[in-house]
Image (spheres, rainbow, N blue to C red):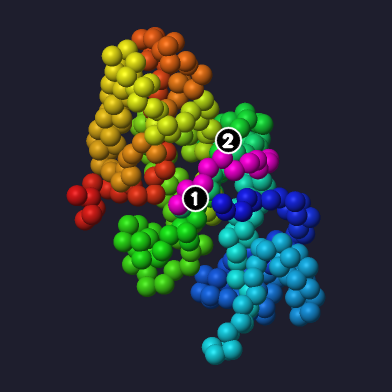
Amino acid sequence: MPKTIRLDSFRYITNEAWRALIAIEMGMKNHEVVPLELAQKISRCKRSGSGFLKLIKDQLVPNSLVAYESDSRRCVCGYRLTNLGYDYLALHQLFNSGQLCDLGTMIGVGKESDVYLAVAGNNCGQQITDETTFELMKIEFGSPVVVKFHRLGRTSFRKVKEKREYHQHRKACSWLYLDRLASSREFLMMKALHSHHVAVPQPLAHNRNAVVMSYVADSFPLSRVVPSVLRVLDGLLAKELYSQAREMLQKIASLGLIHGDFNEFNLMVVGLGDVELDAVTEDTLLTIKLVLIDFPQMISRAHPTAE
């Protein structure tokens, strides 16, 4: 079981420490480990030398936000950002922009992601660009939302290279950068599908490896629906779910896309949670809805591997 993100030390990190953390992130664009001098230069912190080192050792290293590495054979030493450090940077921006105001418990773990409940901030769903401000869907302050953190590092690089376009034919690429590409791609796919009325969670915000989306309440994976439930009403429930799934696939295909991982684990059933088996009626079928989640393998129908 992966470690959950704890925010105990989050509020105690100083502005200078955040600048140092961002500097190490920026330095990792072209360094496996970032030398102390380079991190200090990028951060433009007033502290230098031993003072900057103390800042890192006092606030970043103890909280596992960065790790020190040295390789005597290559004469390389410096700091690298950890997964938790990357998560903190994403959350820091999401909190500051008012997208979120708190992070809750982990509600799901996948091969390539961790999913958390969170609390919507006063700007949740509002997207700001250089030219304009627009709302995808304004969420009421304090409402439950979901944050998905991408974790491609759990998968071997060979599998990622075979199944994903994120690396864009790069020979080498850090896991953190791949996570960023994966989350950005998922957010854009969700926006496209949602705008065409495909039943997916509402995309609300994106930063680094994190995607914020609406919370699908009263739902569970289709894989948990037992056969005895599907057989009620002479199989009408099964037929309704099949009809919705087929219609969803056809709509996605009409948009020129292929989901790539369309299965019972990525389809959530809404509206069946509190219904007893003997209480399922034809009216119940009118309230049941399938919602599609998880889009890391979605590609265009024109893609070479689409077949």
Q: Taking 24 as reference, is 214 above or below it?
A: above
Viewer-proximal residue among 71 and 236: 236
| Residue that mark 2 sits on | 145
Q: How many marks?
A: 2
**In which image quadrant can residue 156 be found?**
bottom left
Secondary structure, magenta segment, majority class = strand
The residue depicted at 60 percent of the width and 66 percent of the height is 81
Q: Amino acid at mark 1?
A: Ser
Q: Amino acid at mark 2?
A: Val
Q: Which residue sits furthest left? A: 307
Q: Position of residue 221 (x, y in %)?
A: 43, 33
The residues tagged by marks 1 and 2 sit, at their Cα atoms, a distance apart of 16 Å
The residue depicted at 58 percent of the width and 68 percent of the height is 26
Range covered by the magenta-colored residues: 100-111
**In which image quadrant can residue 66 be found?**
bottom right
Q: Taking 127 as reference, is 17 above or below it?
A: below
Provide the secondary structure element on which disc 1 rests. Answer: strand
Q: Position of residue 178 (x, y in %)?
A: 45, 60
The residue depicted at 39 percent of the width and 39 percent of the height is 265
Provide the secondary structure element on which disc 2 rests. Answer: strand
The residue depicted at 23 percent of the width and 50 percent of the height is 306
> Is any part of residue 47 visible from this angle?
no
Q: Is residue 110 magenta?
A: yes
Q: Position of residue 85 (x, y in %)?
A: 63, 60
| Residue that mark 1 sits on | 113
